[in-house]
Image (cartoon, grey):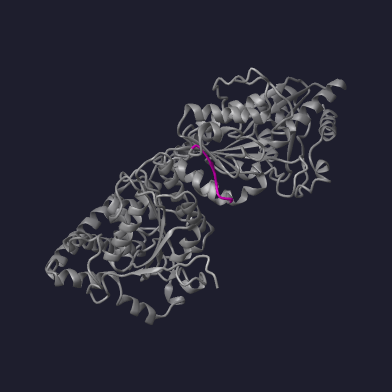
């Protein structure tokens, strides 16, 4: 399979199929994930291939999906649940915070919760209200969870396999805006990627651009523009937000002395604040410029006529980078 | 008028408050002698409960949720399960848990502020105490779904209170039970009060049992102070579940004779008359009379057994009191199966802090 290049969402399907084939404990559940293959097609063909005892459509209730998933995971299965959209996750938070994240802790390891909650994440697809939320920092503050966000087909495949195999609950956020942005070869070899590593996507020496999810696209484009102006930007895809591989970021900042953090979520207490704090704690004397954050505004993401004005853009990233470059 | 569907809710009582049978013994109890060990277990639970309250009052236990008055329901539920079944309690069903192998010291450890109370030696797959109301009902549905998908002959049994039946999670469990035809028994233990809010303020429904109807589950209301009725209700529900016929909601009518927890004072919101009346219907009087009339039990036996219970519970209390506090790193050690570097660093920091202190 997959001698052909595939998209990010096809890589997700490929990872699900691989793991279902090799581990009977893996089941997929969610709204419309069965015969319909998911509203974004992430589970396309899986019910046909594995049957309705492995790929389950659930009643239309997010609380139900979360509760059933925790119940199944704590009894030895490895459920991969889908929340249909980021904005519908909030009823699930009770189960994620109070039970999934605590099951191992509360029982001193007697019961565990090896589950994955997949969620199409973020804005920029001209969707209706509640379909475009960047809510990762709700989960990065919860002990016991892992929070993962791939930004390429290969990382989507490897990180999802790792998430399913991880012995603890993983929130796997899928940047829906880049589901079909481009294709690359993704060997279906079952090779998982580590769940605690940031990826340096572009080497640079003048400034470090740190981002994740769909903003990787704009950030790489910004780096290209900066290069045209003679500025060498290093681009880091955080990929796993929790636990954070801060060493990779620190190493880069030590080299460049400048750090711009780009994310889609609102600025205040967004995950960029955590990275900025770590930079201040651990890299202050490497810095030659204040840390910059290019983020969503502290508003709700507006309905789609305005949403592109809310989201970080190439121009905003370039401008912030140039402000940082003014210091030396 | 044409009728789309019609329903009835059965009320089951086998042993009346005066200790006489309401009819012939039901199939769950083929021999009254088998009730004796369960009656003894109820006495053990009450002994434990009384001593646990006293422990809290003397500062040797944290907040404790007493089970006074619920003993027949709890013991009957626990007695009706097999070791392979899974039990999902709320936070006061000690009688059911003792039947399954949970130790009194586990209960004390939990309310005494130590997570190790949830690490039952037996039963390994039962759920821990669940403080967020009724979430255990839906987790039990998930457990039941896992049994069904893997073709295992196991039943998930979960308990909530009358207040718990108002929660989204309860309705979600009912709905899932019907949608997937799950081997699931949802026990609503209606003790009249959700802290200070009476049963009638929870819902306009005539019974809580009927909430199962909306999900397509079997429904039954039971005298929860009648051990025989509890056993019969559980027999029907678990048999149904094992045959693949789906889930059941059982409403157990009982009464919370104590405060909600030791942090509560029920005198603020309920009258003495109501409590006095409830004491005439509590579960021990009728069963003691029934077993005594059959010459299966007598005062001497009870006195001797209660003395034995006192010793057994005291030994458990001592085991709890003598258990050393967990080392500080225990707060990190069960967070992840594969501990992240940053958590590991904080663990070292906490250990270092401990050495300095």
Residue B243 among those drawn in magenta: no
Q: From the viewer's perspective, is A247 left or right of B64? A: right
* Front-most of residues A302 and A296: A302
Tell me where residue B107 appears, x and y as whole percent.
34, 54
Q: Quick one: which residue is furthest to the front in this view?
A: B2
Tell me where residue B235 appears, x and y as whole percent.
30, 57
Determine whether B137 is above or below A269 in the image.
Answer: below
* Front-most of residues B334 and B23: B23
Tell me where residue B217 appears, x and y as whole percent.
44, 58
* Front-most of residues A105 and A182: A182
Q: How many marks?
A: 0
Q: Which residues are magenta?
A: A54-60
Question: What residue appears at the point 55 percent right and 21 percent down from the top-left corner?
Answer: A191
Q: Quick one: which residue is furthest to the right in this view?
A: A229
Determine whether A118 is above or below B31 in the image.
Answer: above
Question: What residue appears at the point 83 percent right and 35 percent down from the top-left corner?
Answer: A316
Residue B321, visible in the rendered structure: no
* Front-most of residues A257 and B263: B263
Question: What residue appears at the point 59 percent right and 39 percent down from the top-left corner?
Answer: A35
Tell me where residue B70 appears, x and y as whole percent.
33, 65
Residue B274, visible in the rendered structure: yes
Q: Quick one: which residue is furthest to the bottom in this view?
A: B273
Q: What quarter of the picture does the N terminus of chain B occupy? A: bottom right
**To which quarter of the image does residue A192 belong?**
top right
């Amino acid at each position: 399979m997959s001698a052909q290049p595939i998209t990010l969402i096809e890589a997700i399907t490929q990872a699900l199929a691989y793991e279902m084939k090799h581990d009977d404990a893996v089941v997929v559940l969610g709204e419309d994930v069965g015969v319909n293959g998911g509203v974004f097609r992430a589970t396309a063909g899986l019910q046909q291939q594995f049957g309705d005892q492995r790929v389950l459509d659930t009643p239309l209730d997010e609380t139900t999906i979360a509760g059933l998933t925790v119940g199944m995971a704590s009894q030895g299965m490895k459920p991969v649940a889908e929340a249909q959209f980021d904005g519908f996750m909030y009823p699930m938070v009770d189960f994620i915070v109070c039970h999934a994240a605590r099951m191992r802790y509360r029982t001193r390891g007697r019961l565990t919760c090896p589950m994955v909650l997949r969620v199409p994440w973020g804005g920029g697809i001209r969707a209706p209200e509640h379909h475009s939320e960047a809510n990762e920092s709700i989960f990065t503050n919860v002990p016991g969870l892992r929070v993962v966000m791939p930004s390429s087909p290969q990382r989507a495949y490897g990180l999802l396999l790792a998430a399913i195999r991880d012995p603890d609950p993983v929130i796997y956020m899928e940047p829906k805006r880049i589901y079909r942005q481009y294709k690359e070869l993704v060997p279906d070899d079952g090779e998982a990627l580590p769940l605690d590593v940031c990826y340096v996507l572009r080497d640079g020496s003048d400034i470090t651009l740190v981002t994740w999810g769909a903003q990787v696209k704009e950030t790489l484009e910004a780096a290209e523009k900066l290069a045209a102006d003679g500025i060498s930007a290093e681009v880091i895809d955080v990929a796993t937000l929790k636990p954070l591989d801060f060493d990779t970021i620190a190493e880069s900042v030590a080299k460049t002395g400048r750090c711009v953090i780009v994310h889609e979520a609102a600025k205040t207490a967004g995950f960029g604040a955590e990275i900025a704090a770590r930079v201040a704690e651990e890299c202050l004397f490497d810095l030659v410029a204040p840390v910059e954050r290019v983020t969503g505004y502290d508003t709700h993401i507006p309905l789609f006529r305005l949403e592109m004005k809310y989201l970080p853009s190439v121009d905003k990233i370039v401008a912030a980078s140039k402000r940082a470059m003014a210091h030396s | 008028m044409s009728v789309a569907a019609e329903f009835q809710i059965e009320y089951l009582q086998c042993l009346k408050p005066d200790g006489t049978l309401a009819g012939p013994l039901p199939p769950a109890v083929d021999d009254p002698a088998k009730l004796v060990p369960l009656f003894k277990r109820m006495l053990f639970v009450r002994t434990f409960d009384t001593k646990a309250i006293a422990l809290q009052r003397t500062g040797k236990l944290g907040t404790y949720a007493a089970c006074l008055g619920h003993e027949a329901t709890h013991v009957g539920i626990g007695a009706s399960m097999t070791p392979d079944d899974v039990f999902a309690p709320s936070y006061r069903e000690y009688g059911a848990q003792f039947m399954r192998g949970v130790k009194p010291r586990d209960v004390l450890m939990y309310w005494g502020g130590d997570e190790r109370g949830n690490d039952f030696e037996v039963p390994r797959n039962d759920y821990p105490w669940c403080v967020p109301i009724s979430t255990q009902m839906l987790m039990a549905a998930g457990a039941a779904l896992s049994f069904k998908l893997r073709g295992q002959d196991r039943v998930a049994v979960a308990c909530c209170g009358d207040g718990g039946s108002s929660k989204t999670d309860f309705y979600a469990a009912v709905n899932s039970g019907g949608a997937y035809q799950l081997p699931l028994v949802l026990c609503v233990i209606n003790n009249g009060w959700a802290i200070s809010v009476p049963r009638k303020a929870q819902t306009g429904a005539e019974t809580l049992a009927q909430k199962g109807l909306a999900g397509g589950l079997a429904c039954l209301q039971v005298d929860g102070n009648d051990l025989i009725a509890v056993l019969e209700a559980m027999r029907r529900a678990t048999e149904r579940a094992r045959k693949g016929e789906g889930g059941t909601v059982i409403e157990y009518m009982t009464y919370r004779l104590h405060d909600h927890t030791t942090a509560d004072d029920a005198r603020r919101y309920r009258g003495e008359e109501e409590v006095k009346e409830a004491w005439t219907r509590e579960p021990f009087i009728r069963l003691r009379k029934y077993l005594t009339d059959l010459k299966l039990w007598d005062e001497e036996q009870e006195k001797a057994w209660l003395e034995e219970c006192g010793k057994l519970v005291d030994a458990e209390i001592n085991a709890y009191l003598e258990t050393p506090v967990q080392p500080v790193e225990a707060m990190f050690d069960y967070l992840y199966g594969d501990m992240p570097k940053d958590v590991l660093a904080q663990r070292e920091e906490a250990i270092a802090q401990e050495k300095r202190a």
